[in-house]
Amino acid sequence: MSMTITEKILAVHAGRDHVSPGDLIEAKVDMALANDVTAPLAIKVFREIGVEKVFDTDKVTLVADHFVPNKDIASAEQVKIVREFARQQGLKNYFEGGESGIEHVILPEKGLVLPGQLIIGADSHTCTYGALGAFSTGVGSTDLGAVMATGEIWLKVPPTILLRYEGSLQPHVGGKDLILHTIGLLGVEGALYCAMEFTGGVISRLPMYQRFTMSNMAIEAGGKNGIMELDETTLAYVAGRTSLKPDIFRSDPDADYERVIDIDVSGIEPQVAFPHLPSNVRPVSEVGNVLIDQVVIGSCTNGWLEDLRDAASILKGRKVSPGLRLIIMPGSPLIYKLAMREGILETFLDAGAVIGPPSCGPCLGGHMGVLASGERAVATTNRNFVGRMGHPESEVYLANPFVAAASAVLGRVGGPDQL
């Protein structure tokens, strides 16, 4: 019987010939991950189960990335729990400090997540790895603790929404705009517990960093996962990062989809999501005069080297608007190093930016960019809920790196064509 790419991956990992939407399955996990916020509770649950060792020391990854460098005593204690557990278990993949970075950037970068795998993370943006042609989804820490003990998880097979993108992209429009536009069409619950399969000629031409951005934000439409079929671009990205041969799955031509949505990208401008929902989207030409106090460029959504290049192309030879704070957060130490080598960081510094370490930092209102009452920020992050970046009376506007950089110069929300 015919299946989608998501159904095929789940069937193989459940040891079945076929699965259908709604089936309850027990599936073997290729990678389990957690961070300094979610791992401590998962570790507590793991210990309560009573097993001595994790199911596979190569297949459990722990990353200190949310409140690091430790912002206070509480966050230091959290990381200490994770660090000591990783040492006690002999985990191969524990990342902290100069070896760390944002989990959803460094795992693909280091070749730890691969096409065809089933990846479970105690973080909602684990769906990022669907860009590689993997099934990856976020769960709660309790579930992750059980996964670390058993190497298995129970799942309900999700129905799939097929999203086909065709047409030609306008200048300064990319994956962030496509996913914001899509979330605007669907709403924040429009793909609730569905697999979102991204396809079409536009997707086949997107570079990997923009594919990661799209899969990353599938959760913002309520999706269980966001996935793309493996192609030459994927294989080129994976090559050299691992010696393992990737598993290749493709949807059958006659696979059954809950919905098929065709999107012509030709008329899509750079998108801006207004407070307080990622679905509250407007084209940048319809933003109006929205003055801002801060711009954040980075996060697991747009902290890739190419994102920094995009922002630097706008900021080169320009200055940040007086009184505005521009914060840059590279996604990993390697990205930081390459950005420094290419002169990108110098461009940011010359423009008046603050460059932070590879960390989630301000994205979740953690530190290094928390907003005060009444302040507004443009961010390349993934969420703009009430209080997401600080005070509940602050506002966050989501945009791509081109728009974020242009807004930093303008002192208000705006696109590169307004410079």
Image (cartoon, rainbow, N blue to C red):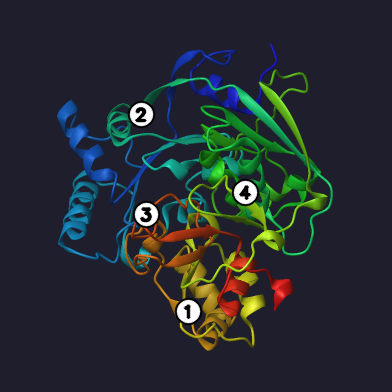
Where is mark 4, residue-wise? 180
Q: x, y percentage for residue 409?
A: 59, 79
The disc, 3 or 4, on the residue closer to the chain's N-terminal end is 4
Residue 100: tell me if it is visible.
no
Position of 240 relative to 204 (above/below): below
Amino acid at pointer 3? Gly
Q: CA distance from mark 3 to mark 1?
A: 20 Å
Q: Nearer the viewer, mark 3 or mark 2?
A: 3
In the image, taking residue 38 as reference, residue 159 lies left or right, namely: right
Q: CA distance from mark 3 to mark 4?
A: 20 Å
Question: The residue tagged with tag 1: helix, strand or loop?
Answer: loop
Amino acid at pointer 1? Leu
Q: CA distance from mark 2 to mark 4?
A: 34 Å
Q: CA distance from mark 4 to mark 1?
A: 25 Å
Where is mark 2, residue-wise? 151
Mark 1 neighbour density, 10 Å: few (under 14) some (14–19) many (20 or more): many
Q: Quadrant of residue 371?
A: bottom left
Taking the spot 63% from the left edge, 47% from the top edge, the residue there is: 179
The disc, 1 or 2, on the residue closer to the chain's N-terminal end is 2
Taking the spot 61% from the left edge, 47% from the top edge, the residue there is: 214
Q: CA distance from mark 3 to mark 2?
A: 36 Å
Taking the spot 59% from the left edge, 60% from the top edge, the residue there is: 399
Question: The residue tagged with tag 3: helix, strand or loop?
Answer: loop
Where is mark 1, residue-wise? 324
Mark 4 neighbour density, 10 Å: few (under 14) some (14–19) many (20 or more): many
Q: Nearer the viewer, mark 4 or mark 1?
A: 1
> Which quadrant holds the N terminus?
top right
Mark 3 neighbour density, 10 Å: few (under 14) some (14–19) many (20 or more): some
